[in-house]
Image (cartoon, rainbow, N blue to C red):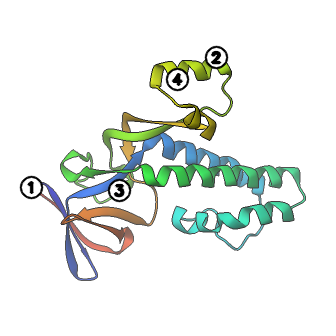
Amino acid sequence: MMQLQVMVGGKTIAVDGVLFHSAAAIAKWQRLLAEAQPLVGSFSTGIGIWGSPGVALAGAAALGFLEAAVTGANQKRGFHILAEAYAAYERLKPRGVIVPVSDISNCEHPAVANWRARGAVPSEMDVRNMGRAELAGLKDRYGATDEELRSGFLIRETVQDLMVLPDEFVTCRSGGRLMMIKWDRVETYELQD
């Protein structure tokens, strides 16, 4: 079985799987962040909006308060888009899958941003703005329930391109346990068969 041997803090960890997410869903989330940034402009929040998802989005509860505090229409729109980005991220997080190291391409190098895989993940279809005829078609085609359609997002498992969620921590499986490794703390890295 192929593994990654990583050393963190002097301790060697045998990683046999890594958490991956839909590359399309990550791209959508990143597009929303990029769209919001120029609109928010130089408004100082003190919560590091543009940092790692784990830190930046932790302040999302304050977005409504901050949106109310700004007066410019563009800044208000920017905070609205940030809230949408936060919601997309929160829907994305639990929809990851553990990919065995043997199925990860480019993992011979420790740059996780370049790692890729293909696999089945729960994917969402935004149905909030669909008409009755389109929704009826989804019921026929995917067996969607009224409750699913009222939620605004239809979730079905699809095979697609996967990537590691951009963050300072990488979720890995080792010996059947999941752990988050602060990737910039990895001292040594070796791919083993």
Nearest-to-viewer mark from 4 and 3: 4
Q: Which mark is residue 133?
A: 2
Q: Residue furthest right?
A: 71
Quarter of the picture containing the N terminus is bottom left
Query: Which residue: 55% across, 18% down?
Result: 137
Vertical comparison of 41 with 121: above or below? below
Q: Secondary structure at mark 4?
A: helix
* Image marks 4 and 3: residues in contact by CB distance under 8 Å: no
Query: Which residue: 42% across, 41% down?
Result: 122
Nearest-to-viewer mark from 1 and 4: 4
Q: Secondary structure at mark 1?
A: loop
Name the residue carrying label 3: 112
Name the residue carrying label 1: 193
Q: Reading the chain from its start, which is encountered first: label 1 or label 3? A: 3
Amino acid type, label 4: Lys
Query: Which residue: 27% across, 48% down?
Result: 106
Residue 72, picture quadrant: bottom right
Q: Position of residue 79 (x, y in %)?
A: 75, 55
Q: Reading the chain from its start, which is encountered first: label 4 or label 3? A: 3
Amino acid type, label 1: Asp
* Image marks 2 and 4: residues in contact by CB distance under 8 Å: no
Q: Reading the chain from its start, which is encountered first: label 2 or label 1? A: 2
Q: Which mark is residue 114?
A: none
Q: Secondary structure at mark 2?
A: helix
Vertical comparison of 107 with 139: above or below? below
Q: Residues within 10 Å of mark 1 (few under 14, many from 20)?
A: few
